[in-house]
Amino acid sequence: MDPRTLDELLIRCMRCGDCQAVCPTYQATRDEVAVARGRIRLLRAEAGGMEPGPKFREALSTCLLCRACTSRCPPGVEVDSLVMDARGRMAERDGLPLAYRLAFRILERPSLTRLAFRMGALLQGAVLSPAWKDGLMTPRRFVGLGGRAAPRLRAPFALPPGRARGGRGKVALFPGCLTNYVYPQVGRAAVEVLRKNGMEVVLPGSGCCGMPMLAAGDRAGAIRAAEANVELLGGVETVVTPCPTCALTLRERYPVFLEGRDSHDAALEMGRKTQEICTYLGGMELREGKLAGKITYHDPCHLNWGLGVKEEPRALLRSLGLELKEMARPEACCGFGGTFSLKNYDLAVQINDKKLEDIAGTEAGIVATPCPGCRMHIEDGLNRRRMAQRVLHPVELLAMGYGGGDAQG
């Protein structure tokens, strides 16, 4: 970012403190450095020549990039963009950890990503054991998971056989990494729901959206991932993704960090034609489905604060006849934040525990959320607390509803 532009953005902060009410890390720590106002103060000091120290690095590391503060900020300071820009400067100066560099180079190459996850699926039994909660695994010994329970890796998502009914149009599905390799059942449910509502679904092939690289400061890697996807999906009319972070990245991030490059116009077009799947389905007249059960809904930060989507997923759930029991704070962050929860697992658990209390208060047996990252972190928390609730994507419930029955059966 140009220093003059950076300075203009930083001085917009009024230091009013409104961000304190919504910042997940501040709510957990009550540390001024862990709130947008404190982070901006440090960024202004860095811009003035301060040498970054441990507190500065901590302030960058403990931001979830949830955008809650931006939504609350009177002058609209985009703190997440400022933090990512600072992480990029730090990475250019100090380099990224070796594990990140290896992981990102793999994610940039879909063939290597598929190979890595297939190897992980084959070897997971050697380093992980079944967790208390079905479908989750916990480390037999330290393997970089921070003691968490993680989903069992599965065969990569592939377009299931079948055809659309009704010929209403064609969409390209962009699954995203977690749907591809961790929750392929979500991809299959998305295809089933789209097809049963008359849509032809194509899978042009997709790699990582680039957000993990961008969030960690690897701007060059994020640009390479973005340009690959822009080229791959350039010939389709509509892109639908079941991952809110992918949707936010394709819609809003690509045009920003590809500005000034030959791919910028194509990135703008990508943004215009990409939709998160609940938003897309919410604009359609859907076939009727029926499902019994009591559920609650968690608002993913990148869908709610990032894309401003709140009602569409709830409307889909209500259309099935499900009893929706709202949490006290459905919009509160779950504590995942991508690499945030890897680097700051203890803090992520503190944030997650508040979410679990809200879930328990609804007495619902199902937690619906469209974000695979939120799902992973909430499932880990449910396992820690020995809570029996299941976590499902709204499209899974829609697919179940087309067959009828009880969501909790």
Image (cartoon, rainbow, N blue to C red):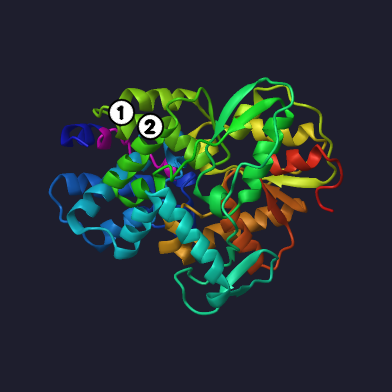
- Residue at numbered disc 2: 231
Q: Give the range drawn in magenta.
A: 9-19
Relative to 324, 351 lies left or right: left
Compare residues 404 and 248 and report the one nearer the observer.
Answer: 404
Compare residues 140 and 306 and report the one nearer the observer.
Answer: 140
Residue 245, above or below 98: above
Compare residues 286 and 26 and report the one nearer the observer.
Answer: 286
Name of the residue lying farthest toward the bottom = 141
Look at the numbered disc 1 and give the secondary structure of its residue: loop
Q: Residues within 10 Å of mark 2 (few under 14, many from 20)?
A: few
- The spot of residue 366 in percent (x, y) is 74, 51
Residue 336, above or below 219: below
> Residue at coordinates 66% horizontally, 42% vertically from top-left?
160
Residue 276 numbered mark, or none: none
> Residue at coordinates 42% horizontally, 37% vertically from top-left?
70
The stretch drawn in magenta includes residue 191: no
User: Separation of disc 2 and disc 1 at Cα?
Assistant: 8 Å
Q: Which of marks 2 and 1 is nearer the N terminus?
A: 2
What's under tag 2, amino acid-wise?
Answer: Glu
> Residue at coordinates 61% horizontally, 52% vertically from top-left?
183
What's under tag 1, amino acid-wise?
Answer: Ser
Residue 359, above or below 256: below
Most common SS among magenta residues:
loop
Relative to 314, 89 lies left or right: left
Residue 263 numbered mark, or none: 1
Name of the residue lying farthest toward the front = 161
Q: In which quarter of the image is the N terminus?
A: top left
Let me know if residue 394 appears in the view.
no
Front label number (2 vs 1): 2
Look at the numbered disc 2 and give the secondary structure of its residue: helix
